[in-house]
Image (cartoon, grey):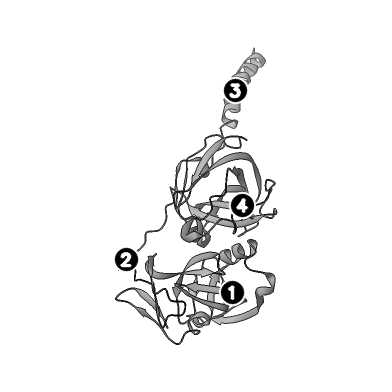
Amino acid sequence: MNNLSAICVAACLIPSLAAAQAAPEHHIWQDKGLFEPMSHTAQAITGPIKLSGNPNFATPGSKMTLTFGNEDAVELTAVGASWREWSDADQEKATAEVFRLDHDPGKLIQGNTLCGDAKKNPARFVVFYEDLFLNHMLLGVDVFQSKNSPRDINSPGLCGTFSFYTPKTGAPATADIQPHSPAETQTASEPPETSVALKAEFGTFVVPVQINGVLTLNFTVDSGAADVSIPADIVMTLARTGTLKSADFIGEQNYKLADGSTVPSQTFVIRSLKVGNRVVQDVTGSVASAKGVPLLGQSFLSRFNSWSIDNGRHVLNLN
């Protein structure tokens, strides 16, 4: 009787254990919600994104909608899931789900695109994964322009990596800055002075700068910076889309920080920087940490006879 009782007990427990083991896997991109931009690439290109939600994890053919910050939307069709390396910040493996885009969304925030020329190199696949940063769970997003489904971060066709705060994490609060009405920018090809409106962002004022004619990013004006400084994730995006060539890198230089310490950084030539209607060519740039902020330094500012910031009107004057 004891053996029979044991068998009965085992038979009763097995379904419960099987049910527990078969609990559906669930990830943050399956939830409907708003994901605020965290990385520089997300802030500059996509803006906040909205996901319609998809309860069916790793189910090929299941669909959901991705809506960008400018309200353009694309339909995503699940291709499959994998556990491989997907983040360019580390070598850790993560569970990810691959989706095919029904079309390239074209121009997004400030006219930027996911993969450069949307007609020649359209975005075809998007990959979602969870990424831990400073004990905060983020939504990682990789975008590929390859015709075949990507297998990992090193697959051909990677053109952009993005990070977003999750609805539960939330973006940090920004300072309550109320900028004045934007100043009108002069339209002459070489005006004696150009005034460019500054924008309020995360407690400071920034100016939109177009890099190499393809990517517009908000920069902080910093006269104490020797060169224009661009975060590593933006530099990698420029390189992946062919906007920045290996021949553009010109070496390494030591830079002095505000605390007196020095750090080495790769330097490269930015073929053009456009602020307002003023374009400066062949500007020396340096690669900053992905955690850093874009800085408009002296390698750009010194190319003008004079420049100033009008704190009353919140504009950058270039002369």
Between disc 2 and disc 4, the foreground one is: 4
Q: Residue 185 is drawn in which quadrant? A: bottom left
Asked if one can make out residue 293 in the rendered structure from this viewpoint, the answer is no
Q: Crowding near pointer 2: few (<14 within 10 Å), some, many (20+)?
A: few
Q: Please, is residue 130 above or below residue 177 in the view?
A: above
Residue type indicated by callout 3: Pro
Q: What residue is shown with label 2?
A: 177
Between disc 1 and disc 4, the foreground one is: 4
Q: CA distance from mark 3 to mark 1?
A: 63 Å
Q: What residue is shown with label 1?
A: 270
Between disc 2 and disc 3, the foreground one is: 2
Q: Position of residue 273 (x, y in %)?
A: 53, 73
Asked if one can make out residue 88 in the rendered structure from this viewpoint, the answer is yes
Of the numbered discs in the image, which one, if any, rests on residue 122? 4
Q: Position of residue 201 (x, y in %)?
A: 39, 65
Q: What residue is shown with label 3?
A: 15
